[in-house]
């Protein structure tokens, strides 16, 4: 059931990607890894809350391009279930931003983007949207209204200018993660 829902979300996102591309919206790059892996990136696993997932986020180069490479084993044992590479933003996104754009490739699985807002929040509170990472390099656009609150008392949408961190995440099921991010930005 979860896979079917993720598949439907991927179809909806593909339609949004086509509409956005047709509108000619330009991506504004947050990171393309050409300068290496910024200290604003961190790697976090469910071990911070007693889980047993393992992995790493590394900078890799292939064919003259730099990638953030998230790999590892996600385990739901001990109430765990995630590994992530998280970017802390130096500046807020503009209020006019409509969504995020990622250039990714992976192992034909569903991954997620997690957004955290400014202000007090608990570690399990974030906004989440799925995306599919095919074996070949593709651009994925995720509009901000596709992000759903998780672990929140009030399910408020997140405003782009309040986002303080963006994470690419292998989440929610037992699996081997293999995700490469070539670019991350907003449109």
Image (spheres, rainbow, N blue to C red):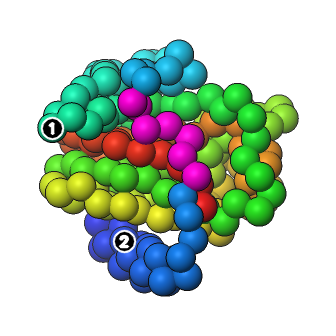
Q: Residues within 10 Å of mark 2 (few under 14, many from 20)?
A: some
Residue at the image point whose x is 70% and y is 29% from the top: 90
**Element at badge 2?**
helix
Foreground disc of the pair 2, 1: 1
Residue 78 visible in rendering:
no
131 left or right, relative to 145: left
State yes or no: residue 123 in magenta.
no
Hey, which residue is sitting farthest front in the picture?
64
Vertical position of residue 92 compared to residue 144: above or below: above
User: Quadrant where the C terminus lies?
Assistant: bottom right
Choose between 160 and 125: the one closer to the eye. Answer: 160
The front one of 39 and 120 is: 39
User: Few, some or many C-alpha atoms within 10 Å of disc 1 (few <14, some 14-19, many ≥20)?
Assistant: few
Q: Is residue 89 above or below residue 111?
A: above
Q: Which disc number belongs to residue 63?
A: 1
- Of pointers 2 and 1, the one earlier in the residue sequence: 2
Report, in whole angstroms, how far the alpha carbon at label 2 lies from the one at label 1: 28 Å
Q: Which residues are magenta?
A: 28-34
Residue 47 image point, x, y percent: 43, 19
Q: Position of residue 158 (x, y in %)?
A: 74, 55
Q: Which residue is mark 2?
A: 10
Q: Is residue 30 magenta?
A: yes
Would you say residue 32 is visible in this rendering?
yes
């Amino acid at each position: 059931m979860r896979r079917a829902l993720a598949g439907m979300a991927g179809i909806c996102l593909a339609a949004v990607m086509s509409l956005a591309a047709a509108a000619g919206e330009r991506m504004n790059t947050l990171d393309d890894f050409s300068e290496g892996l910024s200290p604003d990136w961190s790697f976090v696993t469910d071990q911070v809350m007693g889980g047993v997932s393992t992995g790493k986020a590394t900078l890799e180069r292939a064919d003259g391009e730099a990638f953030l490479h998230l790999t590892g084993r996600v385990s739901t044992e001990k109430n765990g279930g995630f590994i992530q590479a998280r970017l802390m933003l130096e500046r807020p996104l503009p209020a006019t931003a409509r969504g995020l754009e990622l250039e990714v490739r992976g192992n034909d699985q569903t991954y997620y983007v997690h957004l955290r807002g400014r202000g007090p929040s608990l570690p399990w509170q974030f906004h989440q949207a799925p995306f599919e990472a095919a074996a070949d390099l593709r651009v994925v656009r995720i509009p901000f209204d596709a992000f759903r609150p998780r672990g929140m008392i009030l399910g408020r949408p997140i405003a782009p200018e309040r986002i303080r961190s963006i994470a690419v995440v292998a989440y929610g099921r037992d699996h081997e993660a293999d995700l490469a991010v070539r670019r991350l930005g907003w449109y």
